[in-house]
Every structure is written in C-alpha cells, then in structure tokens.
Amino acid sequence: MRSIGRVLAVGLLCGLTLVPIGGRGLAAAGAVDLNTASVAELSELPGIGPAKAKAIIAHREQSPFAKPEDLRNVKGIGDALYERVKDHVTVSAPKASAGRGG
C-alpha cells in the first residue's frame, strides 16, 4: 500500500512540473505566430531571447513569413534552433497593406 502512495505522489509532482506557474507560458498561450508576435511573446520560445526576437520582427517587416520553416532565414537561427522551436510556432497569412486604391 505504501508503494502505491509513493507512485501517486511522484506522479502528482511530475504533473505539477508541467504546469506553468504564473504568467503566460507557451502551454497556455498555444503556438506563437511569427507574423504577429511581440518581442515578449517570441522571447518565450526556447532558445530565443530579446535579440533574436527583434531579428525575427525585423525580418518579417521586410518579408513576412509564409511558413514556419522560413524562420531559418533569420540571421542567427539555424537548423538546431529551428528544431527546438518548430513545434511552438505557427504562421498566419500576412495582413494586406492598406494602400490607396482607386
């Protein structure tokens, strides 16, 4: 009977470590959209700090992301880092610019 209690206690503790405490974690927020995310949201991605987040935003201002794999085109993001974040990112269709039409 003691071993069942220990197994349950360990299982409960392991489950609690997967739940973010306070703030918005990636699990609560879902996938981060590369075309709309802020520096703060991008910085939550594994291996992405404020500098790389700013580089992602600068890249998307020049050329919005068409697919998550385009993240590899950002300076400083190679295959290894992309593999770490690929399951945490998504790409929405870029917004059409509000140009003057006739």
Image (cartoon, helix red, strand yellow):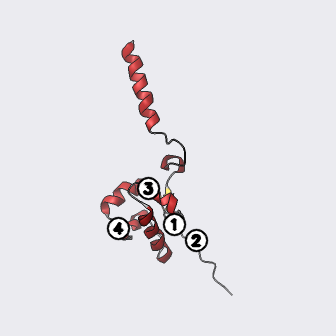
Q: Dot 3: few (<14), some (14–19), or many (≥20) neighbours within 10 Å?
A: many
Q: Amino acid at mark 1?
A: Asn
Q: Quadrant of the N terminus?
A: top left
Check the image and name the residue furthest to the right. Answer: 102
Cβ atoms under marks 1 and 3 closer than 8 Å: no
Alpha carbons under labels 2 and 1: distance apart: 9 Å
Q: Amino acid at mark 3?
A: Leu
Q: Which residue bears the numbered disc 4?
A: 76
Q: Dot 2: few (<14), some (14–19), or many (≥20) neighbours within 10 Å?
A: few
**Count of marks overlaid on the render:** 4
Q: Earlier in the sequence, mark 4 or mark 1?
A: 1
Alpha carbons under labels 1 and 3: distance apart: 14 Å
* Marks 2, 3: nearer the viewer: 3
The location of residue 11, given as percent across then percent down, is 41, 28
Q: Earlier in the sequence, mark 2 or mark 1?
A: 1
Q: Earlier in the sequence, mark 1 or mark 3?
A: 1
Report if residue 46 is visible in the image.
yes
Of residues 23 and 56, the one drawn nearer to the viewer in this rendering: 23
